[in-house]
Image: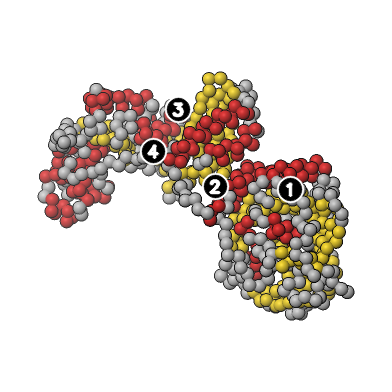
Amino acid sequence: MFGGIQRRVVSLWFPRLASDRVLRVYPSDGPFALTLKRNNANRLYCLNIDAAQQSLHPGMAYSDARAFCPSLQTVPADLQRDQQFLKTLRRWATRYCPWVGMEGRDGLVLDISGSGHLFGGEDGMLADMRARLMRAGLSVQIGLAGTRGAAWALAHHGEGQAPPGDMLPALRDLPVAALRLDEKTSTALIRLGLRKVGDLAAAPRAPLTRRFGPDVLLRLDQALGQQPEDISPLFDPPHYGVRMTLPDPIGLLSDVMAGIERLLTQLCAKLKTQEMGARVLTITLRRVDQDHQEIELRLARALHDPQRILPLFKRGVAEMEAGFGIDQLRLEATQVEALPAQQITHISAAQKGPLEDLITRIGTRVRLENIQRFLTADSHIPERSFIIAPAAYSEPASGWACSNPRPLCLFPPELIAATGPHPPKRFRWRRMSLTTGRATGPERIAPEWWLEDDNWRSGLRDYWRVETTQGRRLWLFYTPQNPGWFVQGEFV
Amino acid sequence: MYETNPRFFPPTTTRTHEVCGAGAFVFAFALAARLGGYVMWIRESWEPRQINPNGFADFINPANLTLCNTKDQTETLAVAEEALRSGAVSLVVMTLNKPLGLTEGRRLQLAARDGESTGLAIIPEGMGSNAAETRWRCAPVFDSKSSSQDSTLQKWELIKNKSGTLGVWHVRWDPASRRLIVVSPPGE
């Protein structure tokens, strides 16, 4: 049914994307370049037109460039932000057609089949793109053709449009590098005398494949439309943010909370349909005087229940300064987690909800990481027989079993004066004179040789449970390899 | 004769109590076991003394205990008040190092009453606050008669009581039945 529609692809190439991005924010006259540190040397990465006219080129050593052009201004390149900027441009380009993909580090590819007439034909659309990008301060080269490969070739080598139908006439006079071949292959082709795409198309195919592998002819066929090539559009990540702008400023706590409740209901409905739960929520309150304040709420578990989240905001909102009034509220779930619907059973009847809300509320005062719980660990070393983990990011563990009695509390080993492998009759500990009434032991615990632990440098330990006639029941140990007595814990 | 469900224990719920002495942790865990439910244990983060889940597993399930590390005593009291008022936990244990004023003590009492949960402050000897409902001094006692494994004899003194009489009891913890047993004092 759609067989009659000719596919039309636009390739946008931003030859100076990185430097244009920086110059948009900090305009400067004269030669300008971005530098990138590669192999321990600063090299030019991206230049503006003035710098290119001074016979500088990308990849040149920075010190050489300064020698050629003393007035050169430079800024370190930021590849990550360039990538973000290109993603922003990709989003902008969806105004022309829904099918927009990224092309390498500095290009976009648009499938405009069937949407050209909306902008007054293809010429009108290209002129519109060029005008808008020019106004934004971006230099661009545009290629339009029936295939992605041909559009790329035209964008990178002399801009142009290929009419619908056969691509070969438009590409015939372009160099072979326009086929997206790597430099080594294109140099080898030029050495063979195949300088133009037309030469390559006319050459016999079998020897070429034998000499260069299938890649060269694949690229040629893709450019000429004999092999299909797809454009994969990127999906925008789901956005969990809602906002509310008010005609008149508000300042009462109850009003702000009512506003937050409305936003929260909207946001939670969206989270619930996508089976997600918010872990971190941020509210931005914009005031009439253009100042804004943020409240961050970190939840002890992922939630999408507005009735449970709302009271947790109370403390943060109460601390805010309303000034002359608040006229915009913005609520965003900055961190979300999958929260699938769960079967309610009689086993999960234990109400953990209030405890989790309490952890969240306390977590706004002390940090959420400071609220912890014990988890089991598989070790005979007393200090490592359990793990302390943040309660918000762990599940309670079961299976606490220890065959030998363990003390109720532990502390770092405290040296006492005693000798010999048997517990001393009398000893002093924490300025108390103690007499041994009964000693049970020893229980020998060997250090875990596979783990480096400074506390266990003294080797084996023989643990004794010593009941003193004064009452206290202590956990003593003796280190036979490195004689000494220590107290490490206290029993019930 | 053993008395397994003593009348003095647990002390009034929905109030905040104080305990001091070497056996304070035992009192705290015995109270947690008696009350059941979740426990919030608040301590200052610098404290070297660490409760050992393998040790107190004889009293309560360590999964029911939530630890909270705080910066100073002010934060401890704030967290304790919040936890008591929420009613999500049945017992809030806090370790205090400085004397408590009447205002702070009274706020803890009100929070415990509102949230219907019990608070317990572990205090150094002789540093109690006037607002506490009861104050206990707990010390382990050497028990020459019983075997070494179940020598858990303690002497619990009730040294302050706002609504009752004082007293001294000798008790023992039975890990099998998770119950407190009142025994006669050991002979000389």
Asked if labels 2 and 1 share a chain, the reply is no
Chain holding disc 1: B
User: Is residue B78 at least partly visible in the picture?
Assistant: no
Residue at image point 59% right, 68% down: A379
User: Is residue A165 at least partly visible in the picture?
Assistant: yes
Amino acid at dot 2: Arg
Label 4, residues with CA under 10 Å away: few <14, some 14-19, many ≥20: few
Q: CA distance from mark 3 to mark 1?
A: 68 Å
Q: Quickly name the residue at label 3.
A: A27
- Which residue appears farthest toward the front when viewing the image? B1
Name which of mark 4 and mark 3 comes first in the sequence.
3
Q: Quickly name the residue at label 4.
A: A236
What secondary structure is marked by label 2? strand
Residue at image point 84% right, 71% down: B186
Report whether A408 appears left or right of A166. Answer: right
Q: Quickly name the residue at label 1.
A: B14
Q: Nearer the viewer, mark 2 or mark 1?
A: 1
| Image quarter (top left, top right, bottom left or bottom right) of the C terminus of chain A | bottom right
Above or below, A117 relative to A477: above
Chain holding disc 4: A
Label 3, residues with CA under 10 Å away: few <14, some 14-19, many ≥20: few
Asked if labels 3 and 1 share a chain, the reply is no
